[in-house]
Image (spheres, rainbow, N blue to C red):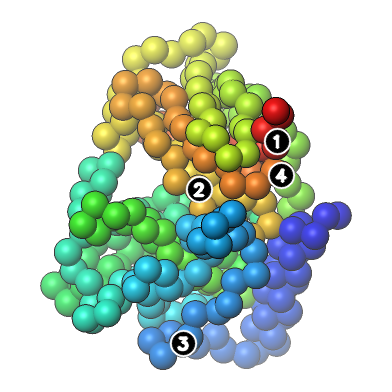
Amino acid sequence: MNAPRKLAAYALGLAAVFGAATAAGAAIEPTGLANAEPAEEEHGGMPDGMALPGLAAAEGGLRLVADADTQRLGAEHDYRFRILGEDGVVTDFDVEHTKRMHVIVVRRDFVGFQHLHPTMSDDGTWTMPLTIDDAGTYRVFADFVINGDKHTLGTDLFVGGNVTPESLPEHDHAADAGDGYTVHVEGEPVVGIESELEFEIRLDGEVITDVPEYLGARGHLVALRDGDLAYLHVHADEERLEFEADFPTAGAYRLFLQFKHDGEVRTAAFTVDAAEETR
């Protein structure tokens, strides 16, 4: 097992211990994070020293503050958070991909991916119903734009219970999206350049061309680096299922493509390996 996977397994192991305490009768109480200091991040520096998106709860004068960092397994909870700036709670967000806030929730071994859109109250509190069916340590990403600048902040959410970490799936150009849908990806990620990824959707083996818009484009793609879950910003072609992404380091990444067809949003997950540019 390589070092990044060991880190992920370690995090899940902590969640397993946490879950064992719960089973023994320890109650899980929400932990306020309003006064917590952002953790020092050990992974994912850009070549120029800038941090990659999603690795910290604070970046660029903004801070993600969640009301709780624990949640009970299998029950729906209202997950609440705020974005704080230098002058207090931020309430003015740009619309991107038809929404002012995108939230990604996924366990640190890429299990249980969810893409959610919370609603904001007048005081700047974002709220969304959240149910998690598998115990473990999850990463919550808040993806938003303010004054034309894109930001992604991340924080952990702990769900008590017995945890069985899953290995990262091997690189495959095809993924199952359920009910006869499969998605194929073309393109080889290369470090340090805008890498093009093109997806093709098939239903029972037949290529689908009538893919309607989902969040203002033909699809939505989230890319996360294996090990630390650094969040890659990707750029979508509004007319086709094509994306450009900048892969910062060599290694494995997990891609989650979402598209809408026949009235239902579907998700296909891929593992890709980014290689160093050959000169």
- Work out how far the residue at label 4 is from the one at label 3, CA to CA, in angstroms: 32 Å
Give the foreground label among 4 and 3.
4
Q: Residues within 10 Å of mark 1 (few under 14, many from 20)?
A: some
- Work out how far the residue at label 1 is from the one at label 4, CA to CA, in angstroms: 7 Å
Give the foreground label among 1 and 4.
1
Instruction: Give the x, y percent position of residue 231.
Output: 51, 53
Mark with earlier residue (2, 4)? 2
Image mark count: 4
* Direction left: furthest residue: 122
Instruction: Give the x, y percent position of residue 81.
Output: 34, 73
- Work out how far the residue at label 2 is from the one at label 3, CA to CA, in angstroms: 25 Å
User: In the image, is residue 135 above or below residue 30?
Assistant: above
Q: Which residue is mark 1?
A: 275
User: Do we see residue 72 in this rendering?
Assistant: no
Mark carried by residue 232: 2
Q: Which residue is mark 4?
A: 251
Left or right, residue 173 beside residue 195: right
Which quadrant of the figure has residue 11? bottom right
In this view of the protein, which residue sits in the foreground, 11 or 154?
Answer: 154
Q: Secondary structure at mark 4?
A: strand
Circle 4/circle 3 CB separation < 8 Å: no
Circle 1/circle 3 CB separation < 8 Å: no
Kind of residue at disc 1 = Ala
Q: Residues within 10 Å of mark 3 (few under 14, many from 20)?
A: few
Residue lying at 62% horizontally and 39% vertically, measured from the top left: 191
Which quadrant of the figure has residue 118? bottom left
Q: Which residue is mark 3?
A: 36
Residue lying at 54% horizontally and 31% vertically, measured from the top left: 195
Left or right, residue 104 beside residue 249: left
